[in-house]
Amino acid sequence: MNRAGPKPAGRGRRWALPALLALAALLALAYAPALLGGWVLSRVATVQAQQVSGPLWAPQLREATVRLDGVTASAQQLGAALDRINWRDKVVYVGLDLRGAQVAVNLGELLEGAEPPASFLGWKVRVSRVQVQDTRLNVQGGTVNIPAGQFRVEQGTGPQVAVLTGQTQEGAVRAAVTLRQQPTGTEYLADLTLDARVLRHYWEGVEAGTITGRYVLGGPEVTGDLRLSGGAVAVPQAGWAAAQGVTGTLTQRGSQVRAALEGQLWNGPATLRAEADLDREHWTAVLEAAPKLSALAQAQNPASPGDPGTKADGDAKVRVTAGGWNRVEVQAAARGGPGHYAGVPFEGWRASYAFSNAGPHYHDFLNEVALSAVTTVAGRQQLTARWPIGGEGHARWQGDLAGQPLNLRAGLDRLQQAQIEGEALGGPVSGGYNLGTGAVTGRLNPAYPGVRAQLDLSGTADDLHAAVSRAELAALPGQVYAGTAHLDTQGLSADLAQASGAGRVKLNLDRDWKGHWEAATGLRGAWVEGAGQVNVPQQRLFGQLAARLPGVQAQLEGPATLDWGRQTGRFRAAQAGEGGAAALEWAGGAVRLQASRLKLTQALGNLSLSGDARYDLSGAVSGQLVAQGEGVRATLRGEGRQVAWNLGARGLNLTGRTALTPDFATAVRLNGDVSARAALEEGGVRFQVTTRGEQASGLVSGRRWLARGRVDLAALQPLLPAAGLGPLTGTLDLNLAGLGGQARLDARLGERRVTGILRREGGQAYADLQATQPGGWQAALRGQVYPVVAVRGRLSSEGQDLALEVGGPYQNLRAAVSGQTAPLTRSGVTVPGQRLSLSAQLTPQLRASGRWGTWLCSGSKERSRSQAARL
C-alpha cells in the first residue's frame, strides 16, 4: 500500500517562476518587432506604421511614415535589419529597405545639421546601408525617380565623415562627404564618382561614360562642378543616332546650371551648350554638329558579310536650339552640299524640325518636319516635303528624269499612309506608301523614248518586287519582254524574257546602282548577245558584244560602251576569221557605221563591204558604202532624206533611189529599158513596172496578190547570164487578185520556147509549163511552186527519156533525175546510152551525186570531180 505523504508547499511555486519567464519570453518574441523594432527605427527618425512584423533583428513596417529634419517619407514597406554592432563605441548599425516609397527632401532643413536622436543607455543607432526600389524623390517640389539599387553608408576616414557607395543595375555610385567649417556655418562637400549609365534610369540613351566632380551644400548657395569623360549616347529605338567620345563639364552656382559637352556624331564634331535657371524654371540648349553622310548611312544600315550596307558621300551642318520648362520649343536646321545617298545623287539639301507646346490652345501645338533637296538622278529634280507629325503632310518631286518630265505628288494622312500619283519616264505613276509599316504598292508605266513597259509594285522599300509586263525596246521592234524585278537592301535584280523567242535580259545592281548586265536577242534574222558592267548613277554601260547579222559571213565580236547621259555609244567589232572589221557609233542624234572589208555571205556573192555612212535620227543620211567582188559592185550613197544605190555586174546596171519616209518609196531603172516604182502601203508593197512600153502594176500584201498588166520579157535580157543562150523575147500577162488568178507565160530564149500558165488557188501557186528545143527536145513540168515546191516532169528526145522531180521549201530545194540517156558522140567517139540516176541539193548550196551507167559521179558549186570507179 502506497502511502504518499503530503507534497511540500514550495514545490509548485518552484516551477511557477520559470513558467512565467518562459511566457514572458514568448510574449517578448511575439511582440519584439513592435516593442524593439519601433525603438530601433526611432533612434533614426520619428516613425509611425499601421503594422509591424518580422523577427527582432529585421522588423518590417507596412504603410509607414518616417519624419526627420528635412526629410519626410511614406513607404508601402519599410524594413530595418541588424547589420553589425560596435560594442566598444556602443553603436548599432542597421540597413534600411524602402519599397514603394515617396521621399520629400527640404534641402534647407536637411543641411541645417540636426542633432541625432538621443541615445538609450549610451547606445546609438546608425544607418549603414539603404536599399531602394520603386522610389520617388521630391526635392523642394521637383520629383525625381530614384534608380533601384543597394546603397551602403560607412564611416569616413580623415576629414571624410561618411562614404556612400551603391550599385544599381546600370552602374556604381560613390560619394565621399566631408565637413568644412565656414563663417556662414558648416558646409558639406560631396566628392562624386559614378558610372554615367546610372542615368539610364532617366533616359535609356546613355551607353557609357564616367562622371566625377564635387558638390558643395550648406553654404550661401549650392555649387557643383562635374566632368563627363568617355561618354557615349544613342537614341533609343534609333541606335544609328549615336554620339561617341563625349566629354565636357556641368557646373551649378545656386540656381544657375550650365553644361558644355563635345563629342563625335557620325564621324563629325558635335558640341552642346545648355543653361538652366532653377528659380525662373527655364532652360536653353544649343547643339551644333558637322556629321559625315557616309557615317550616317552606315549607322542606319551597316555593312555585313555579303552586304556592303548603305553608301553615301557628303557633309552636313546641323544646329538645334531648344528651351523652356513645362512648355518647350525646339528648332532644328540641317543643310548639306553635293553628294549622294544610297545611290541617289544630289546637289544640295535642307531640312528643318520645329516643336512647340508653348501656346495656350491645342491649335498652337507644333511638331513638324520639312525637307527640300535638289537631286540629280539621271537629270535634275527638286524634292520638297512638309509633314506635321501625327497630321496630314505633303511632298513633291519635280524636274527632269532621264530626259523626261517628272512630276510626283504625295499626300500623307494621319495614319501615315502616303498616296502617290503623277508622271515619270513618260507615263503615269500611282501607288501608296505606309510610313509605319513600310508597305509599298503601285504601278509605273514608263513610256521613255525607246522603252515602254508596265511595272506593278509590291512589298516594302527594303524588299520591293515588280512584275514587269509588255516591255518593249525601240531598238528591238516587235520584241516584247516580260519578267520580274526585285529591289532590296542588296540592290536591284531583273530577269526579263522575250515573249516569243529565246531573247533574255538580266540585270544585277548593288545598292549604288552598279552591277552586271546580260542580254541576248533576235531581230529580223539577226542575233545579238553580250554581257558587261553598268553604272546607273554615271549612266554608263560597257561590255562585250557578239552579233550574227543577215548577209554577213561571220560573227562580229568586240567591246561596246554606252553613255546614255551624254547620248554616246560605240561598238567596235572584228569579223572572226575573215579579217573584216566594223564600228558602230552613236553620238547624240546620229548613228555612224564604218566598215572595212566586211565579208558578206556567199548568197550575196563573194563580196566585201567597206565605207563610212551616217544616219541622223531626224531621218537624214550621208556617206557611202560599197560592196564589191568578182565583177560586182554595189553602192549605197546617202543624200539627205533618201538613199541612192547602184548595182553593176557583167553588163547589168541597176540604179535606184529610196526615200527615207514611212512608205520607203523607191524608183528603179534597169539599163534604160525597165523602170519601176514601189512603196509600202496597206501592210504590203504597191508596185508599177514599165518594160519597153508595156506596163504592169499591183499590190502584194501577205498572201493577197493583186497584179494586172503585161511584162515585155525582152527588157529583162540584162538579168540573164551572158552565156550565148540567144535573145530573150516574149511576154508575161498578169491577172492575179486576192488568193487566186493566173499568169500566162510565152517566152523564147534563142530557139528555145517556154509556154504555160501559173495559177493561184487559196494562196498557193501552181505551174503547168512546156518547153521545146530544136533537135526534138521536149520538157513538161507540173505541180506546186509556192509557198513550197513540189513539181514533176519529163524530159525527152530521140532515144532519151528522163523523169524530173523538184521539191521542198525554197531554202532547202532538192531535185532527182532518172532515166535512159541517148548515145553521146564527141570527136568521133560514141558512148552508148546509159542508165542515169542523179540526186541534187539545189539550195542553199548546189551539190549533186549519182550514177551514170557504171560510173559514180559527184560535184558541187566549188569544184567538180568524178570518180572513175568501174563497177
Image (cartoon, rainbow, N blue to C red):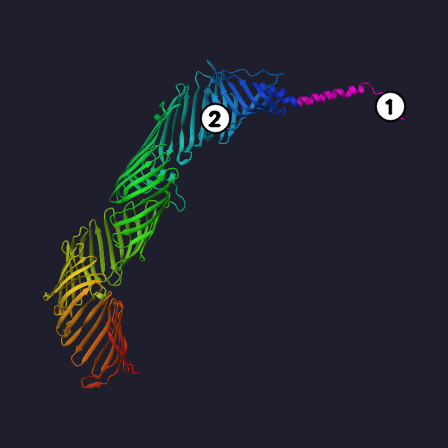
Instruction: Give the distance between the C-alpha atoms of the residues marked 2 and 1, in whole angstroms.
Output: 79 Å
| N-term-proximal mark, 2 vs 1 | 1
| Residue 512, numbered label | none
Q: Position of residue 345 (x, y in %)?
A: 29, 41
> Quick check: marks 2 and 1 in contact, CB under 8 Å?
no
Instruction: Find the magenta span and give its range.
Output: 1-29
Front residue (pair 487, 624): 487
**Residue that sits furthest to the top in the current view:** 183
Q: Residue at x 36, y 42 (%)?
A: 440
Residue 215 drawn above or below residue 397: above
Front residue (pair 160, 138): 138
Front residue (pair 468, 586): 468
Residue 34 in view (yes/no) = yes
**Which element carries disc 1, helix, strand or loop?**
loop
**Which element carries disc 2, helix, strand or loop?**
strand
| Residue 145, numbered label | 2
Q: Indicate the quadrant where residue 857 lies.
A: bottom left
Q: Nearer the viewer, mark 2 or mark 1?
A: 1
Q: Horizontally, is 202 left or right of 393 in the view?
A: right
Q: Residue at x 18, y 76 (%)?
A: 771
Front residue (pair 798, 407): 798
Q: Position of residue 715 (x, y in %)?
A: 12, 68
* Residue 19 drawn in magenta: yes
Residue 336 in view (yes/no) = no
Dominant secondary-structure state across the stretch colored magenta: helix
Q: Position of residue 760 (x, y in %)?
A: 22, 67
Which residue carries the number 1 mark? Answer: 4
Q: Indicate the quadrant where residue 743 lies.
A: bottom left
In the rendered image, the quadrant that contains the N terminus is: top right
Badge 2 amino acid: Asn
